[in-house]
Image (cartoon, grey):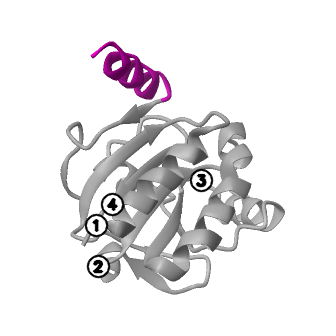
Amino acid sequence: MKSLLVSLALLLAAGITAAGMNAGQAPDFTLKSNSGDNLRLEEHRGEVVMLNFWASWCAPCRQEMPHLRALNDEYAPLGFTLLGVNVDEDLDAAKRAIAELNVDFPVVFDDQSKVAELFDVDAMPTTIIIDRDGNVRHLHRGYKPGYEKAYGEQVANLIREM
């Protein structure tokens, strides 16, 4: 029991919230992507989806980008989709950051923060992991080195679920 409480305290301190907090269907949205196409969340039903809300001015966002690229490289072939959701009001700043950070996964532009509001984003970065049925399963607010291990474990577990 004590180890369970310690584990829970560590998860909460790391900004990780289990499915109960924002459980339920992820709200659908459509946004323009960095490829120029419109991207709709609903089109990824049947995949494990990670939404990473970030901004060019956010130092922790920039710090976690290489880890997100590695996560995407590892799990994309297994039914995983990583979508960066950039909330910069200045599209040019967002596009410069994508180039500087070598972001190679799809990024959609939420320059009016409407999608961020749908997901109650109140910290940068915010990472939301959605299961194959479209349910929000994990929520991470902020970023500190080591969070990527939890992301990987959570994504792997959801990929294994059938």
Which disc is residue 130 wearing?
Answer: 4
Q: Main secondary structure of the magenta part?
A: helix
Which disc is residue 88 wearing?
Answer: 3
6 relative to 42, above or below = above
How far is disc 4 from disc 1 in space, using C-alphas? 12 Å
Element at badge 3? loop
Q: Amino acid at mark 2?
A: Gly
Q: Amino acid at mark 1?
A: Glu
Q: Which residues are magenta?
A: 1-14
Nearer to us of marks 4 and 1 is 1
Q: Amino acid at mark 4?
A: Ile
Which disc is residue 40 wearing?
Answer: none
Q: Is residue 19 magenta?
A: no
Image marks 4 and 1: residues in contact by CB distance under 8 Å: no
How far is disc 4 from disc 3 in space, using C-alphas? 23 Å
- Residue 118 place in picture, x, y as percent: 29, 52
Q: Amino acid at mark 3?
A: Asp
- Disc nearer the start of the sequence (4/1): 4
How far is disc 3 from disc 2 in space, using C-alphas? 29 Å
Classed neighbour count for the residue bearing mark 3: other residues with Cα under 10 Å, few (<14), some (14–19), many (≥20): some
Residue shown at 35% from the left, 62% from the top: 158
* Residue receiving disc 1: 161
- Disc nearer the start of the sequence (3/1): 3
Element at badge 4? strand
Residue shown at 69% from the left, 74% from the top: 104
Image quadrant in which you'd find residue 59? top right
- Residue 102 place in picture, x, y as percent: 78, 67
- Residue 38 place in picture, x, y as percent: 45, 83
Nearer to us of marks 3 and 1 is 1
Residue shown at 38% from the left, 55% from the top: 129
* Residue receiving disc 2: 46
